[in-house]
Image (spheres, helix red, strand yellow):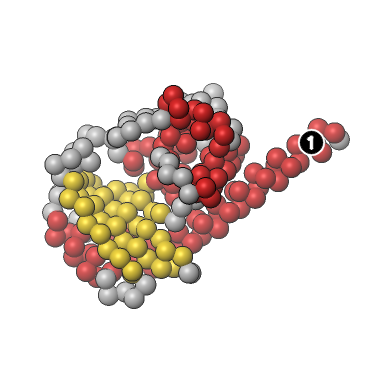
Amino acid sequence: MTATAVGAPGHERDAAVLARQAARQKQALGVLDALRPLQRWERFGEPRLCGAMAYGLLVAPDIDIEVFGELHVDAGFSLVSEWARDPAVERLLFINAVGEPDAGLGWELQYRYEGERWAVQMWLLAADYDGPRSADLVAPMRAALRTTTQARILRIKEALVGRGEEYRSIDVYRSVLDGGVNDVEEYARWCRSYSSTGMINWRPSPPE
């Protein structure tokens, strides 16, 4: 009985943060249903949902999509011109990073949904792109996550967002899954030695 009583608050805290994530996922699915970016990009390549939404680690209102195909700038602009007619679309950005390490073309769409502004970030990459692909991280992340580590990552990300601190999601994932970090204070200490910059080709260790 004592062990259950002591452990209950932790379980309740995990349940609460996971419930908040589930609510964000529901909102994100509403955004995808309204804009249909995955279906619309199929004309130009292979679209893949990636990032926090794909891992079940959604905190900030961001959706990430990678599309693998031919690097034709007209492809993305033909799509954003359709979205621009939607009054809920508040902003559209274009990034030409073909000559940079990202080696692709990017579009960001900011969309007002249920009172919140969502950013839908879409990168068009060459079909044979051999750099770090976020899409390739989805399966290893899903395999590595457990309910406890999922909740820890979400709590750390929520704390960082609440403080208004900039952070790299991949560092939070590395700190918890490889470094055993438990909270935002431990994460800050971990970052002093292990934080990353630039592009990083990381995969979590397979679960034991």
Q: Is residue 46 left or right of residue 114?
A: left
The answer to whether residue 149 is above or below residue 108 is above
The answer to whether residue 24 is above or below residue 183 is below
Q: Is residue 42 left or right of residue 175?
A: left
Image location (x, y in percent) of residue 67: 26, 50
Instruction: Give 128 or 82, whichever is nearer the viewer.
Output: 82
Q: Is residue 194 left or right of residue 97?
A: right
Q: Is residue 140 left or right of residue 9?
A: left
Quadrant of the drawing holding the C terminus: top right
Q: Which residue is mark 1?
A: 6
Query: How many labels sit on residues?
Result: 1
Q: Residue furthest right?
A: 1
The answer to whether residue 13 is above or below residue 112 is above
Quadrant of the drawing holding the N terminus: top right
Q: Is residue 69 visible?
A: no
Q: Is residue 79 visible?
A: yes
Instruction: Give 83 or 68, whichever is nearer the viewer.
Output: 83
Instruction: Give 189 or 158, whichever is nearer the viewer.
Output: 189
Image location (x, y in percent) of residue 88: 37, 72
Residue at position x 34%, y 42% in the image: 135
The answer to whether residue 172 is above or below residue 44 is above
- Badge 1 crowding class, 10 Å Cα cut-off, few under 14, some 14 to 19, many 20 or more, is few
Q: Secondary structure at mark 1?
A: helix
Residue at position x 54%, y 41% in the image: 156
Residue at position x 57%, y 43% in the image: 155
Residue at position x 41%, y 54% in the image: 62
Image location (x, y in percent) of residue 190: 49, 28
Q: For residue 82, what is the image quadrant?
A: bottom left
Image location (x, y in percent) of residue 137: 38, 37
Look at label 1 and name its amino acid: Val
